[in-house]
Amino acid sequence: MLLMQVINDNSCSWINDLLPRTNIQSIEGNNDCEWLIIGAGYTGLSAARKLAELNPTQKIILVDAQCAGEGASSRNSGYLVDTTLNDGFTSNKELENYKKKSDIYFLGINAVKKFIDDYQVDCDWNQCGKYFASSKIKDKKILTNFSNLLTKLGNDHKLYENYELSKKLGTKFYNIALYTKGGILLHPGKLARSMVNALPKNVQLYENSNLLNWSSFKDYICCDFKNGKIKTKKIIFATNGFLQSLGIKVNYNFPITLTASMTRSLTDYEFKSIGQPTEWGVLPVRPMGATIRMTKDRRILIRNTAEVYNPFIMSKEELKKRSLFQKIGIAKRFPELPQNIIQSTWSGIVSRTRNSSQIFEKIRENIFVAGCYNGSGIGVGTLFGEQIAIKANNENSKEIEVIERRNKPTWLPPQKILNIAIRSRLFYERFIAKSEI
Ligand SMILES: Cc1cc2nc3c(=O)[nH]c(=O)nc-3n(C[C@H](O)[C@H](O)[C@H](O)COP(=O)(O)OP(=O)(O)OC[C@H]3O[C@@H](n4cnc5c(N)ncnc54)[C@H](O)[C@@H]3O)c2cc1C
């Protein structure tokens, strides 16, 4: 197992929009509990909330290596997705597989919606749908196939082209887009923070506490941190992009580093120059194209990198290089805007599996894990967190039945071969999508 130290940059606009947290406690000395959850992103926070509801008198500890919720859960692009495009969907069998996936997305949206309603959360929720857009008119074929699939599944959607599209988005860059109505745009940091604030009283939260090592015995699991230990009866691993480094499902998942940038709010003049569009979100038709979003407060977010990179840190110099890349991406789409409007650039770690399927399972007696959501962790992470808690509590639910019907993650080759394979794949996909970055 690697001796880990998760170090994040402190330059994420979403996190900087929030008030700084106080009363942060770290693990010290020897601790005992009934339940331990490692990782306080959407998955771990939702697992803790649900476990506390199911076991109000039991002691639950939730631990994170950094500040709770401030990993990928606050660093993402904020698309709560009802559909994703980059899956197979041409034959009937693939339609069946896609349906399994979209059933999970649907439950994910419901899980977040219920949380928001129950706790009266303001996270800039906007059910404005999203666009799968391309500058290449030849991508119409892909979008038409996708449209046929969505029609079979009964998802509301519409194809847009040229003038109509540029009016909606305020950019002439895209020539074709498929708009899907069901998706939601939100502020990921506000959502994650509200989950931290909603933690019930019987959950003890420890932050800036790296799990360094863990071992399982017959009736308990022992976890080592720099300044203390925790002995627990049951454990849930919710560390997503860091599962592999903790020796969990190592042959089934791998970390990918994403970087994103956000501009300052556009001035009235700048906003008028692009036609004053209302909030929108674009996802690329090609996997390595840019995700780009206009927020309700007129900021532009862009994410156009995905790399095999040391998941524990990205230096300021490295971030700067990616920021330049994102500056070019914005300039291509909005040539009328000034060049230096990027306010912050940050990185975040996600977890991938070979067949893009999620991990949700009991890996050994009293040891559970949920993760690997690709670009759908807002909804699916919230859902999987709640449901892994129910499963670990030896209960069942209709959601668990839907989750367990999904295709299981497939086996990965050894790390060295895998890294070469992923790098070549990403290189190929970047080449195919080069005009869309
Ligand atoms: C730039 C970017 C854009 C994205 N866009 C979207 C999007 O638009 N929509 C969407 O649905 N998803 C998106 N995602 C993915 C989404 O953010 C993740 O799927 C989601 O955050 C997963 O939640 P999680 O709780 O499982 O993991 P995380 O949020 O990664 O939380 C895991 C936590 O585990 C902690 N941890 C790791 N190792 C240890 C250890 N040893 N000890 C203690 N704690 C540890 C970490 O500090 C972290 O806080 C994006 C991600 C990124 C980075």
Image: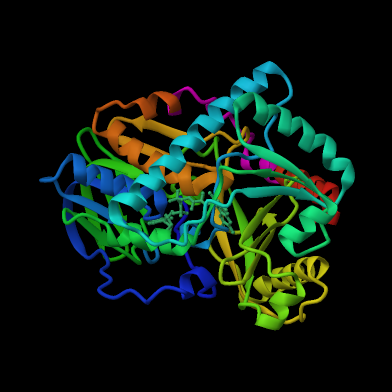
Residue depicted at 75% across the width and 68% down the height: 330
Residue 187 in the image: above or below residue 353? below
Does the magenta-highlighted stretch encompass residue 405? yes
Name the spot of residue 381 as percent of width and height, x first.
Answer: 44, 45
Q: How is the image coloured?
A: rainbow
The image quarter in which residue 337 lies: bottom right
Q: Looking at this view, is 419 or 321 the one in front?
A: 321
Residue 70 visible in the picture: no
Name the spot of residue 29 as percent of width and height, x first.
Answer: 19, 63
Residue 30 in the image: above or below residue 401? below
Along the horizontal axis of the image, is 197 left or right of 202? right
Residue depicted at 33% across the width and 41% down the height: 386
Does the magenta-highlighted stretch encompass residue 181? no
Name the spot of residue 240 as percent of width and height, x first.
Answer: 47, 48
Name the spot of residue 184 as percent of width and height, x first.
Answer: 53, 50
Residue depicted at 84% across the width and 35% down the height: 141
Along the horizontal axis of the image, is 352 left or right of 71? right
Which quadrant: the C terminus?
bottom right
Residue depicted at 66% across the width and 31% down the height: 150
The magenta stretch spans which residues?
403-419
Along the horizontal axis of the image, is 31 left or right of 215? left
Q: Looking at this view, is 420 or 203 the one in front?
A: 203
Q: Looking at this view, is 279 or 429 the one in front?
A: 279
